[in-house]
Image: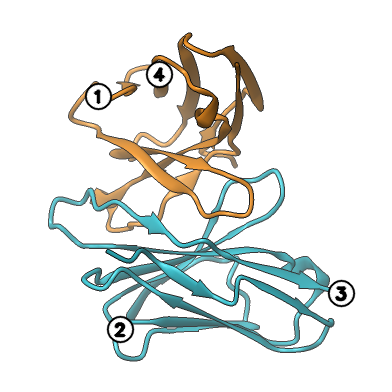
Chain colours: A orange, B cyan
Amino acid sequence: DQQVKQNSPSLSVQEGRISILNCDYTNSMFDYFLWYKKYPAEGPTFLISISSIKDKNEDGRFTVFLNKSAKHLSLHIVPSQPGDSAVYFCAASASTSGTYKYIFGTGTRLKVLA
Amino acid sequence: DTGVSQDPRHKITKRGQNVTFRCDPISEHNRLYWYRQTLGQGPEFLTYFQNEAQLEKSRLLSDRFSAERPKGSFSTLEIQRTEQGDSAMYLCASSLASGANTDTQYFGPGTRLTVL
C-alpha cells in the first residue's frame, strides 16, 4: 500500500524554465511534508518542508504547495539549473499520531538541460 | 558543523556473514533513524531512537536485524546471517525533537551493502 506516490518517474526541463514535481498521498493523518534531493551514492539532502497548517512555503528558488483537500503537494523550482539534476523524493509524516517516521515516495528523476 | 556520518560507506559480504554499521548523528540531535533504500524505491523506515530508547520498529526489521544506541549518541545496526535480499543502501538520519512535531530529519551518506 503506497501511501505516498510520485507518479512521474522522470522529468526533463530546459535550463531557466520552471520544474514542477508532484506528489500524492492517501493518509489523511499526514501533517508534515518534505522534499529531499538525492545524488547517486549520496544520502538524501533536505530541501524544503511544509506543515499541514500551511498551503505554501518558499525558500529561494524552491516553493512547495500543499493542497490538503486533494491530498497533493508539488515542488516548484524556478529557475531550474543544471545542478538541480537529481532524484527528488517527497516524504510525509503523521507526527501527531505519535510516530516520527517518514514515508517516502519512489522519486522523480529531474534532468535540467543546458 | 559536521553532518550525519556513517561507516563504512561500502560493505561487501558473503551470504551468512554478520555485518555491523555505525552511524554518528549531528551532535545535538536526540532522535536517530535507520532507513533502507533499494533500487528504484524511496527510503523505507526501519527503526528510530529517542536518546537511547528504541521507540519504534518496522515490520521490515526481522529478527536478524538489531539496532542499538547505548549512550544516546552513535548507533549501530547489525544484520546477522545476511541474505542476498539484504543488499541495499542503509541510511541513517537524525533530528532534534523540537516539541512542534515537525522535526526535520537530516541524512547521512549511507552504507551500501552487497551480499554475494
Dot 2 falls on which chain? B
Q: Are marks 1 and 2 in contact (CB under 8 Å)?
A: no
The residues tagged by marks 1 and 2 sit, at their Cα atoms, a distance apart of: 35 Å
Residue B30: x percent and y percent? 24, 72
Q: Disc 2 marks which amino acid?
A: Glu
Looking at the rendered structure, the secondary structure element under dot 4 is: strand
Residue at 53% over, 44% down? A38
Which is more toward the observer, B38 or A37?
A37
Answer few, some or many: residues within 10 Å of disc 2's Cα (few below 14, many 20 plus, some between 14 and 19): some
- Same chain for labels 4 and 2? Say yes or no: no
The residues tagged by marks 1 and 4 sit, at their Cα atoms, a distance apart of: 9 Å
Residue B92: x percent and y percent? 47, 66
Dot 1 falls on which chain? A
Which is more toward the observer, B87 or A52?
B87
Residue B34: x percent and y percent? 48, 67
Q: Quadrant of residue A35?
A: top left
Residue, disc 4: A76
Answer few, some or many: residues within 10 Å of disc 3's Cα (few below 14, many 20 plus, some between 14 and 19): few
Sequence-first tag of 1 and 4: 1
Q: Disc 3 marks which amino acid?
A: Leu
The circle drawn on residue A58 is 1
The residues tagged by marks 3 and 1 sit, at their Cα atoms, a distance apart of: 45 Å
Q: Quadrant of residue A47?
A: top left
Q: Are marks 2 and 3 in contact (CB under 8 Å)?
A: no
Frontmost of labels 4 and 2 is 4
Q: Disc 4 marks which amino acid?
A: His
Visible residue check, residue A67: no
The residues tagged by marks 4 and 2 sit, at their Cα atoms, a distance apart of: 38 Å
Judged left or right of residue B26, residue A54 is: left
Residue, disc 2: B52
Residue at 36% over, 69% down? B32
Residue, disc 3: B116
